[in-house]
Amino acid sequence: MKKMQTTLLLLAVGGTLALARAGTAAAASPAHGRTYEPCAKVADMTFGTDGWMFEPWEFNDTFSFSATAALQELNEAFRARGSTLVLVPVPSRPYKYLSKIDPTLYPNLKFSPETYKQSWQTMIQAARATGVTVVDLLPSVENYSTSETGEEFFYPRDHHWTTSGVQVIAPVVAQAISALKLPGLNKLTVKMDGFSLKKEGFNSGAFADRYTKACGSRAASSPAYKVRYTKQTGLLDDTVATIGVFGDSFGLAYPDNNFAPLLEWNTKLNTVNYSLAGGGSLGALTGYLADPAVNHSLPQVVVVPFMGAVPNDANQYRQITATLRGCPGPVQAVQSAAEAAVTFQADGAAHSAVHLAFTQDTQKVKLTLDYQDGTSEKMTLNRSNADYFKGDRRNFYVSLPADRTVKDLQVSTDHAMNPQDSVSLCKR
C-alpha cells in the first residue's frame, strides 16, 4: 500500500459575526447602519452590518420546479448506466442572514424568509418525486451556529459557503449517499487519517473585489485555511472516482475548493472533482459527460452541488440524457458545409436524439428543430471557455421528444463549419 499526502487549500471568509439563532434571519434583531458605504457604481448592491454585502439576484424568494418528466428521464438514464444521481441545491444567504440588513436603509427590499422556505420545501418535494436523490440543506442552514473559527455558514462578502459551512453539510451529503445502500460501495472505502485544519493566508471575496474595484475603498480580508489529510491508495489510480462531483462554483466551493475533499473525508470514498465555475447548475455534467473518457467510466455516485433552485430548463436535462445514452441504434448522418449556419433535412423516421460532432472546439451552438406537426423549438448549447475545463467542446447531444418527428433542423455555431463536421439523428 502507498500512502499519499493530500494537500488542499481551503479559503474561508470569517470574522466574528452576529448570529440569527432562531432558524431564519428574520428572527434576529434588526441591524442598524452598514459597515461599508456604497458608491454609485454599486448602487444595486445591498450593504449590511459586520461587513456583509449582497447582490440583487440573491433576493428571489419565490420559485418552483416543473421539469419533472425531463429530470425523471435523466435519472433513469443514470440508473441504466449503473450510476446514481444526487442533487445538492444550496439555499441563498438572505434566508439566514437577512438580519444583517438595516431595513430603514433599504425600505424597498422585498424578501420573505417564510415565502422562501415554503418555495424551497415545495421544490424539494417536486424534485424528489422524480426518483432523484435531492439533499435538503435548508435545515443545516437554519440550525447553523457560528463556528469556533468565527465563520458563518456563508461568506459575508461572497455568495459561497465557508469552510465551516461545508464542514457541516459534507456529513449530510455523505449520509444521503450512505442511505442509498448501493451494492458494493462499502467495499470501496479508502483509509484516511491525519486530518488537520490550519489558518494560512487571507481572502477577500468576490463581492468585496467588486466593491473595491468600483469604489476604490478596500474591504477587509479574512483568514484562509488549509486542510491536510493522508490517503492510502492501492492498485487503483487516485483519479478513478467512486464519487464524481459535477457542480458549479459550489462544487469548487470557490475560492476554497473544499467541498469535494471534505465529502471524500466524510465518505472515505475516492472522490474526483469535475466542477465548473460559471457553467451554470448543470454545465459540468453537460461538458464532462460528452468526453468519452469520463462517459465510459462513470462514477458510481454523481453529486451535483449548485447555487439556488433545482433547474427548470428541461433542455439541460435532455442534453445530459442524450449524452449518457449515445446512439446505440442506426443513425442518419449528414455532413455539413463550410458555413456558420446549415439546414439539414430529416429522413422522416422516428429519432431519439441529435448528435452534433465538430472538428474544432466550439463554445456555442444554436439549434432549431422543426417537427412534422408544425411545431418547432430553439435552444442554445454551450461549453465553457475556462482554461481549467478539461471536458469536451466538440460533441453536443440533445434528446428528442417521443411524440414528435423531426422534419428538419438548423445548426449555427460560433465558427464556420466544415465538411468534416456532422449531424447524426439517432433512430429509435
Image: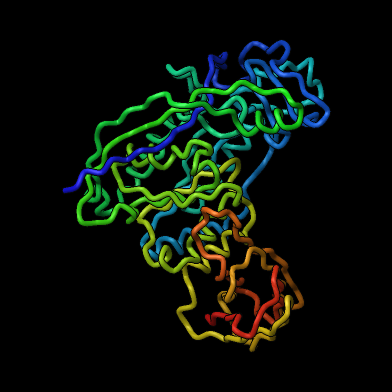
Q: Is residue 372 visible in this depiction of the protein?
A: no
- Which residue is drawn at the image coordinates 44% and 53% (left, top)? 85
User: Taking 79 as reference, is 105 left or right?
Assistant: right
**Scheme of image coloration:** rainbow
- Which residue is drawn at the image coordinates 76% and 31% (left, top)? 214
Q: Pick the residue in front: 395 or 117.
A: 395
User: Taking 58 as reference, is 44 left or right?
Assistant: right
Residue 225 position (above or below residue 260): above
Q: Which residue lies furthest to the bottom in this view?
A: 347
Q: Is residue 253 visible in this depiction of the protein?
A: yes
User: Taking 249 as reference, is 189 left or right?
Assistant: left
Residue 253 position (above or below residue 331): above
Tally the marks: 0
Position of residue 275 measured from the top left corner of the image (x, y, whole percent): 49, 49
Q: Residue furthest right?
A: 40
Q: Pick the residue in front: 202 or 242.
A: 202
- Which residue is drawn at the image coordinates 59% and 75% (left, top)? 358
Q: Pick the residue in front: 411 or 179.
A: 411
Quarter holding residue 415:
bottom right
Position of residue 6 measured from the top left corner of the image (x, y, whole percent): 32, 40
Quarter holding residue 89:
top right
Position of residue 55 measured from the top left corner of the image (x, y, whole percent): 70, 32
User: Taking 120 as reference, is 379 left or right?
Assistant: right
Position of residue 217 measured from the top left corner of the image (x, y, whole percent): 72, 23
